[in-house]
Image: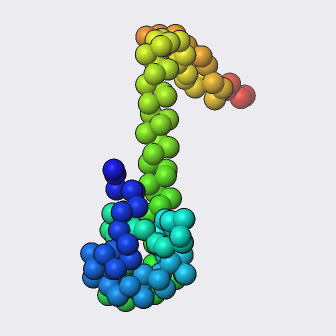
């Protein structure tokens, strides 16, 4: 079992969230919290659903509208998804760096182009000094 396992019937979930069961039905109809359904179509709430219901109650008590709450929950879900994706990409990058050490390092060239280098090397820079003196006119 984990936090997303559908464990609680509506009356238990309502009690844990400090709400009336009818409020949970309303939130389900509005799409704020969508519990899992059994074969007999009854609702089963997970611990994650109960936490989300508590968050809805907190936001509501602070004066946030149901539409505002829907937006907040959607953004929180998006942030969670993006964080998971970042962790996946970081893991893939770490694996790539372990499997191919020193393969590809990039730098910007003098004209702004991308220059591929081996690890531990540097871009050669032009450091010649040009002295310029205007011609004297007669």
In percent of the image, x 31 and y 75: which residue is there?
Answer: 12
Count of numbered tags: 0
Corner quadrant of residue 87:
top left
- Report if residue 55 is visible in the image: no
In percent of the image, x 39 and y 77: which residue is there?
Answer: 10
The C terminus lies in which quarter of the figure? top right
In percent of the image, x 51 and y 67: which residue is there?
Answer: 37
For residue 58, side relative to residue 111 (left or right)? left
Decide which of 5, 33 is in the foreground and name it: 5
Residue 52: image location, x then y, percent: 37, 70
Residue 118: image location, x then y, percent: 52, 10
Corner quadrant of residue 136:
top right
- Report if residue 78 is visible in the image: yes
In percent of the image, x 45 and y 45: which residue is there?
Answer: 84
For residue 97, side relative to residue 108 (left or right)? left
Decide which of 69, 48 is in the foreground and name it: 48
Decide which of 41, 102 is in the foreground and name it: 41
For residue 70, side relative to residue 9 (left or right)? right
**Outermost residue toward the front in this view:** 40
Relative to 48, residue 126 above or below: above
Decide which of 122, 126 is in the foreground and name it: 122
Residue 58: image location, x then y, percent: 31, 80
Residue 17: image location, x then y, percent: 30, 77
Relative to 88, residue 138 above or below: above
């Amino acid at each position: 079992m984990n936090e997303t396992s559908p464990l609680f019937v509506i009356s238990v979930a309502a009690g844990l969230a400090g709400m009336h069961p009818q409020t949970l039905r309303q939130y389900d109809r509005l799409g704020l919290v969508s519990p899992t359904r059994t074969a007999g179509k009854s609702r089963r709430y997970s611990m994650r659903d109960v936490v989300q219901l508590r968050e809805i109650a907190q936001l509501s008590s602070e004066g946030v509208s149901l539409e505002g709450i829907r937006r907040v929950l959607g953004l929180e879900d998006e942030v969670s998804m993006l964080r998971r994706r970042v962790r996946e990409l970081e893991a893939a990058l770490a694996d790539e760096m372990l499997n191919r050490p020193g393969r590809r390092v990039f730098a910007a060239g003098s004209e702004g182009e991308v220059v591929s280098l081996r690890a531990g090397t540097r871009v050669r820079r032009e450091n010649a000094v040009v002295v310029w003196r205007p011609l004297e006119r007669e």
